[in-house]
Image: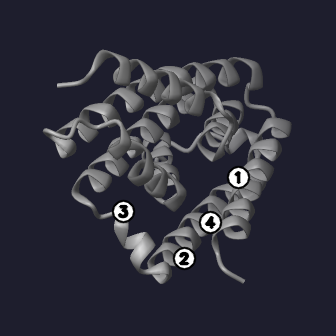
């Protein structure tokens, strides 16, 4: 189904892209440092699942909506920024003794952080088709996206575990987590919402 050379080039590009810092990495770092290893790893798995959501959307052409209807993209960006701001403010306001929220799901929050980032959708719409085989483009995109999600889970899982071990649960790491989340929200708005 895949040409070996094309697949090798894709994997090299995917690894390079995954290793470059971005909102997903910052979120996993912040969550691990603020809430511990388990939260960091679960957040990473949520982000990786979000990659699969974007992959399926790109494979069926839904991500093209963002290019066709700019207002839809803006709505998703603002929704993502509001959610990240909520998480950031919550981290800043929660005392260290109450840091762990048994009702909160780091996995679902990681999923939401990734899915609500329209840049990821546009990236997958632009990136995957160039590597998918012409004979089965949709199926090829799903396979490529699954590989990308697997690499993402492995890398960000390590980031989440390490940040959890190094960060602990001090008030300082929660403040840093809150500031990072608010910074990501501001960055999303500044780089994606037309003035």
Which of the two marks, 2 or 1, is nearer to us in this view? 2
Q: Is residue 144 visible?
A: yes
Per the model, the C-alpha gap separating discs 1 and 4 is: 9 Å
**Which tag is nearer the camera, tag 2 or tag 4?**
2
The single residue placed furthest to the left in the displayed view is 135
Residue under circle 1? 181
Calculate the distance from the C-alpha at mark 1 to the C-alpha at mark 3.
25 Å
Q: Which element carries disc 2, helix, strand or loop?
A: helix
How far, Cα to Cα, is label 2 from label 3? 13 Å
How crowded pointer 1 is (Cα within 10 Å; few <14, some 14-19, many 20+) is rated as many
Q: Which mark is residue 81?
A: 4
N-terminal of the two: label 2 or label 4? 2
> Left or right: 74 with respect to 61?
right
**Quarter of the picture holding the C terminus:** bottom right
Describe the element under mark 1 as helix, strand or loop: helix
Q: How many marks?
A: 4
What residue is drawn where x is 76% and y is 26%?
A: 167
Q: Is residue 60 above or below residue 162?
A: below
In depth, the one of 33 and 158 nearer the eye is 158
Q: Quadrant of the N terminus?
A: top left
In the image, what residue occupies the spot 62% across and 23% down?
Answer: 159
Measured from the top left, where is residue 97 in percent x and y?
Answer: 72, 39
| Label 4–label 3 contact, CB within 8 A | no
Residue 141, label in figure: none
Residue pointed to by mark 2 = 74
Say if 65 sits above or below 27 in the image: below
Q: CA distance from mark 2 to mark 1?
A: 19 Å
Camera-side mark, 1 or 3: 3
């Amino acid at each position: 189904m895949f040409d070996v050379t094309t697949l090798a080039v894709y994997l090299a590009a995917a690894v390079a892209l995954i290793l470059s810092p971005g909102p997903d990495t910052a979120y996993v770092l912040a969550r691990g440092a603020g809430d511990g290893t388990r939260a960091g790893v679960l957040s990473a798995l949520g982000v990786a699942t979000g990659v699969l959501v974007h992959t399926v959307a790109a494979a069926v052409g839904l991500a093209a909506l963002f290019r066709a209807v700019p207002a839809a993209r803006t709505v998703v960006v603002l929704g993502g920024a509001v959610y990240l701001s909520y998480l950031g403010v919550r981290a800043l306001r929660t005392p260290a003794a109450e840091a762990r929220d048994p009702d909160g799901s780091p996995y679902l929050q990681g999923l939401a952080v990734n899915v609500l980032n329209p840049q990821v959708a546009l990236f997958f719409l632009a990136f995957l088709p160039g590597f998918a085989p012409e004979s089965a483009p949709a199926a090829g995109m799903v396979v490529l996206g699954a590989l990308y999600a697997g690499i993402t889970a492995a890398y960000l899982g390590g980031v989440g575990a390490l940040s959890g071990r190094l960060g602990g649960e001090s008030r300082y790491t929660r403040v840093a987590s809150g500031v990072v989340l608010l910074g990501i929200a501001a960055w999303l708005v500044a780089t994606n919402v037309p003035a």
